[in-house]
């Protein structure tokens, strides 16, 4: 049976009503993975046995009259930078070897507590650094809509898994667009929550002040459900907001855009973007208008001008420090050398890929004495200005609509030798991380070549409710995301 | 004209805070003697995916120490990452404080050699985490030449307060005194056990020497001094070295030097080891530390009486000597014990004497802490009251005291076991006892009565016999009086 087509909501309902079993659901997903994974390479580690055992447990709970939770029997895929106890966690790097964490990330624990079943760990750009999932020690991941193209990145495996129907939901992490851009490339929904909404405990850090975990799904309804489960306060993450979360699912039915103000960014409307991406953007703005929203033109000059440069100082700076712990002393690959320095050079030289090394070098440089003020400190000041710029904008509008990425999914290898062009793929997403705001990518249709086209909605800080409300209105026009390679 | 040299010394003291758990995780800080790598968790092992959570107790202890050091405590502060690679530092960065330390601009008084108080400036106090410990397979324990090294992360993450002094110290003796004052202070406050040998208080010294001809040598940073004695010796050595260099017109370079206690010299560390650029930047995993309104005031109100204030009060209120006041306030437990004795009725002077001599002797002989002392302040006071009322002689009291120490018994059973009765032997009972002694020593009595005991030696001998028989329970003057009267009338 093609249970893999079902949404998380549908699976949970059917499993609870006894219409299908959790085991059947998982078996259907595993079959789907078996048939497509060779071409996609979306998963680094599969845990079929564990998944079936967990499914049986859900089924047993149900027959014992217990409630397995909000995600009973729902298969999920987890980006391979989130720890799950006993399951190899690689961050798509050689340096971690076969490291199996002795603890589980809060988000995964919350999912499993609600009856969700982990299928495996998703391919990604090494340590979440990249926009194409080509920078993986386990080989590139393919876009389910066109195997010659990238799924985006760095959460490419998570996006591809949902687009290909491995699972209705998956988790990714977003430091500069790593959820939203692959969501756009793979034609799914992807949400990067407000910084501090979702616990980072168990997420292997890339840039701590920017990283945020969020869900992929094929519908806004499933995004809201997953967010509800993963966004609880967590005392183990000091940057996680301790307040109670609202009921995200409550806004989905009643929402409309009447009396809402939707902002568009003047500078981005003149930006050099792919014509079909522009068409999708314009169509989205039209839908918003026809749903009753007032369209307000905004100017965000600092973000447009300095966003990318600022990001590529702050993110590598934090990364250079976060990745310093991989020294071969306690875990991961090891090497016996006569001299301590030789050991560091050997481990880190062999263990890290090119892109990671590039960012560690950049980050080390901008933090070095004599350069700190000119780079890091200046970037922090610009970041402050960008944050106030957004704050001012959200005093005038409820939501901002902009592109997710300048182009649809590009070809594998196309930007691999051009890091700057690769960085440009995140020009619309990374300012949102800098300001700590929630951003959501929504599928707004397909190009003539059949490639998904995403648009991005931005909300104010802690504005997930209005963001999800707006997205669900637009989704009503666009329809839910399709499964790639399925019957359409 | 001969040149004059002035040493300029500043100290950095790392104090391990005596919290039960580590500064950023809930692991135990009790690492002394623990099996290596047992007091560890994913966080303090620096595993990927872990995040620090600040221990409120460490902040409290830091604020307490800061206030006692007369520092201004910042209401809003933050943590930085100090980045460097070393196997004992599992994250390859130490979470420390940099531009906004917890407290600044303090001072503490030391007594200079001429007896006057001299304030030593405290630049700052900041919080940070301790590193793990490397154990090298070399004879001298140093990394160089080791074929194998082991890491124990039990100590990693233990909270530290780093206390940085101004370069106000002028002599090794002053430096030593400054450290002992800080040590006494942190112990008084209960924020650290301040034990240099165990490494819970560690001192690094910055020293330079100024020459009267205007030259000022670069400073050397001296590490690895594990006792007050070592600190003093290392500074003496360094001062001589600097003066010699300056006298010979040599250039002193800025460097880190290790004190080698057995050889009595400092040795330059290889410059490669210290070529650090720590790349400090704000710790993004911890929000700024903002102390709640009223927090500092609350901590200030909770501060115990500080040792120097208490010493002055002991002198003024109890009329104790400078030396007794100092001895009894040296640590808080002893001062508390003393005052508890007074509350139970002991007289200030006799109690002071008794504690300073008997109690301290027993503590020293048994290498015991006051908290493990078997006799309560109440019982000591009861003894003192009996002595004050001449119901117990000093000798009898000592016997009872020894008995109580050995058997952990209470006062009254100790007294009865020693066959000592409160109120002693006096009056008729004493008279009978003296008579008995005189009968037993008829020959001596005869000599005295014959007037041949010219220098009174024989009579003293008899008195000694009586005192021994009464085991100190008799009043010596009463014994003398009875003895004299019985010898007279026969
Ligand atoms: Zn720990």
Image: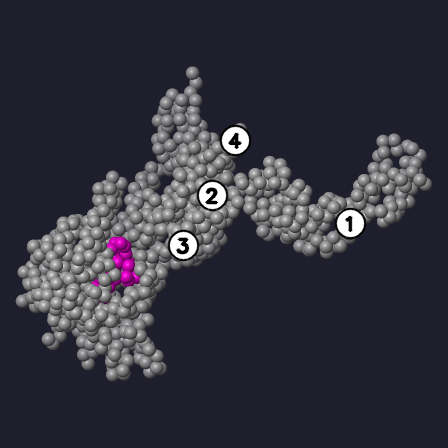
Q: Residue at x 39, y 56 (%)?
A: B25
Q: Gap between marks 2 and 3, in whole Å?
A: 21 Å
- Compared across the picture, whether A285 is left or right of B346 comes to left
- Disc 4, disc 2: CB below 8 Å? no
Q: Which mark is residue A298?
A: none
The residue to which callout 1 is attached is B423
Badge 1 element: loop
**Residue found at the very far front of the displayed protein:** A259
Mark nearer the N terminus (2 vs 3): 3
Mark nearer the N terminus (4 vs 2): 2
Point out residue A191 in the picture as x, y percentages from the top left corner.
21, 64
Mark nearer the N terminus (1 vs 2): 2
The residue to which callout 2 is attached is B68
The residue to which callout 4 is attached is B116
The subunit letter for the residue under badge 3 reads: B
The residue to which callout 3 is attached is B55
Badge 2 and badge 3 in a common chain? yes
User: Magenta span covers which residues?
Assistant: A191-217
């Amino acid at each position: 049976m093609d249970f893999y087509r079902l949404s998380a909501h549908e699976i949970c309902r059917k499993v609870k009503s006894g219409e299908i079993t959790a085991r059947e659901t998982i078996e259907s997903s595993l079959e789907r993975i078996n048939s497509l994974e060779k071409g996609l390479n979306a998963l680094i580690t599969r845990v079929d046995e564990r998944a079936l055992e967990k499914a049986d447990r859900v089924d047993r709970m149900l027959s014992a009259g217990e409630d397995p939770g909000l995600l009973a029997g729902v298969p999920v895929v987890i980006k391979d930078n989130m720890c799950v106890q006993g399951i190899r966690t690689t961050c798509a790097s050689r340096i971690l070897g076969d490291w199996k964490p002795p603890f589980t990330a809060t988000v995964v624990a919350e999912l499993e507590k609600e009856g969700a079943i982990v299928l495996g760990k998703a391919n990604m750009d090494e340590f979440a650094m990249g926009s194409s999932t080509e920078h993986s020690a386990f080989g590139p991941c393919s876009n389910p809509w066109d195997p010659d193209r990238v799924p985006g990145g760095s959460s490419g495996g998570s996006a591809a898994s949902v687009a290909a129907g491995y699972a209705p939901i998956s988790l990714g992490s977003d430091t500069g667009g790593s959820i939203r851009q692959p969501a756009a490339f793979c034609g799914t929904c992807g949400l990067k929550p407000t910084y501090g909404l979702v616990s980072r405990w168990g997420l292997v850090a890339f840039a701590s002040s920017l990283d945020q975990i969020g869900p992929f799904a094929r519908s806004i309804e499933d995004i809201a459900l997953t967010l509800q489960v993963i966004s609880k306060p967590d005392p183990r993450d000091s940057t996680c907001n301790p307040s109670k979360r609202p009921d995200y699912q409550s806004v989905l039915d009643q929402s409309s855009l009447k009396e809402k103000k939707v902002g568009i960014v003047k500078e981005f409307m003149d930006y050099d973007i792919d014509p079909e991406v522009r068409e999708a953007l314009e169509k989205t703005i039209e839908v918003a208008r026809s749903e009753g929203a007032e369209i307000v033109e905004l100017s965000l000059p600092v973000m447009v001008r300095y966003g990318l440069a600022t990001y590529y100082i702050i993110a590598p700076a934090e990364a250079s420090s976060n990745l310093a712990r991989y020294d071969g002393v306690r875990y991961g690959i090891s090497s016996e050398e006569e001299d301590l320095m030789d050991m560091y050079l050997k481990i880190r030289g062999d263990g890290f890929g090119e892109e990671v090394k590039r960012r560690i070098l950049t980050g080390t440089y901008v933090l070095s004495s004599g350069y700190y003020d000119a780079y890091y400190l200046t970037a922090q000041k610009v970041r402050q200005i960008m944050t106030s710029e957004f704050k001012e904008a959200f005093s005038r509008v409820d939501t901002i609509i902009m592109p997710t990425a300048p182009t649809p999914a590009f070809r594998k290898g196309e930007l691999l030798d051009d890091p700057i062009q690769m960085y440009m793929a995140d020009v619309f997403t990374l300012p949102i991380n800098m300001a700590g705001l929630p951003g959501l990518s929504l599928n707004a249709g397909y190009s003539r070549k059949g490639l998904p086209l995403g648009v991005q909605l931005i909300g104010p800080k802690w504005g997930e409710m209005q963001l999800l409300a707006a997205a669900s209105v637009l989704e009503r026009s666009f329809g839910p995301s399709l499964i790639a390679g399925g019957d359409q | 004209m001969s040149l004059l040299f002035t040493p300029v010394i500043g100290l950095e003291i790392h104090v391990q805070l005596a919290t039960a758990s580590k500064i950023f995780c809930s692991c135990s800080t009790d690492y002394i003697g623990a099996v290596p790598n047992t007091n560890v968790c994913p966080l303090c092992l620096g595993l990927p995916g872990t995040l620090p959570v600040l221990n409120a107790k460490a902040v409290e202890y830091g604020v307490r120490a800061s206030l006692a050091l007369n520092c201004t405590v910042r209401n809003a502060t933050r943590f930085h990452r100090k980045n460097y690679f070393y196997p004992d530092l599992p994250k390859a960065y130490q979470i420390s404080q940099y531009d906004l330390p917890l407290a600044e601009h303090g001072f503490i008084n030391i007594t200079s050699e001429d007896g006057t108080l001299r304030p030593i400036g405290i630049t700052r106090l900041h919080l940070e985490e301790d590193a793990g410990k490397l154990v090298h397979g070399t004879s001298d324990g140093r990394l160089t030449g080791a074929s194998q090294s082991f890491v124990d992360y039990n100590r990693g993450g233990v909270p530290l307060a780093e206390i940085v002094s101004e370069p106000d110290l002028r002599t090794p003796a002053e430096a030593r005194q400054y450290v002992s004052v800080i040590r006494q202070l942190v112990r008084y406050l209960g924020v650290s056990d301040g034990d240099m040998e165990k490494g819970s208080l560690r001192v690094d010294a910055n020293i330079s020497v100024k020459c009267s001809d205007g030259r000022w040598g670069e400073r050397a940073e001296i590490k690895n001094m594990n006792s007050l004695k070592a600190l003093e010796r290392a500074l003496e050595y360094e001062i001589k070295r600097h003066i010699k260099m300056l006298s010979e017109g040599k250039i002193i370079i800025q460097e880190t030097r290790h004190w080698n206690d057995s050889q009595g010299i400092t040795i330059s560390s290889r410059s490669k080891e210290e070529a650090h650029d720590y790349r400090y930047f704000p710790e993004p995993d911890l929000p700024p530390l903002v102390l709640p309104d009223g927090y500092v005031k609350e901590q200030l109100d909770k501060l115990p009486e500080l040792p120097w204030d208490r010493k002055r009060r002991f002198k003024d209120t109890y009329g104790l000597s400078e030396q007794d006041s100092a001895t009894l306030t040296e640590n808080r437990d002893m001062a508390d014990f003393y005052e508890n004795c007074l509350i139970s009725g002991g007289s200030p002077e006799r109690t002071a004497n008794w504690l300073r001599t008997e109690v301290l002797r027993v503590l020293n002989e048994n290498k015991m802490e006051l908290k493990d002392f078997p006799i309560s302040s109440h019982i000591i006071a009861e003894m003192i009251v009996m002595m004050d009322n001449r119901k117990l002689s000093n000798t009898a009291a000592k016997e009872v005291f020894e008995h109580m120490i050995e058997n952990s018994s209470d006062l009254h059973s100790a007294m009865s076991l020693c066959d000592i009765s409160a109120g002693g032997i006096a009056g008729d009972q004493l008279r009978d006892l003296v008579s008995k002694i005189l009968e037993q020593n008829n020959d001596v009595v005869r000599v005295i009565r014959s007037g041949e005991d010219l220098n009174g030696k024989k009579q003293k001998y008899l008195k000694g016999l009586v005192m021994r028989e009464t085991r100190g329970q008799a009043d010596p003057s009463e014994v003398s009086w009875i003895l004299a009267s019985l010898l007279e009338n026969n």
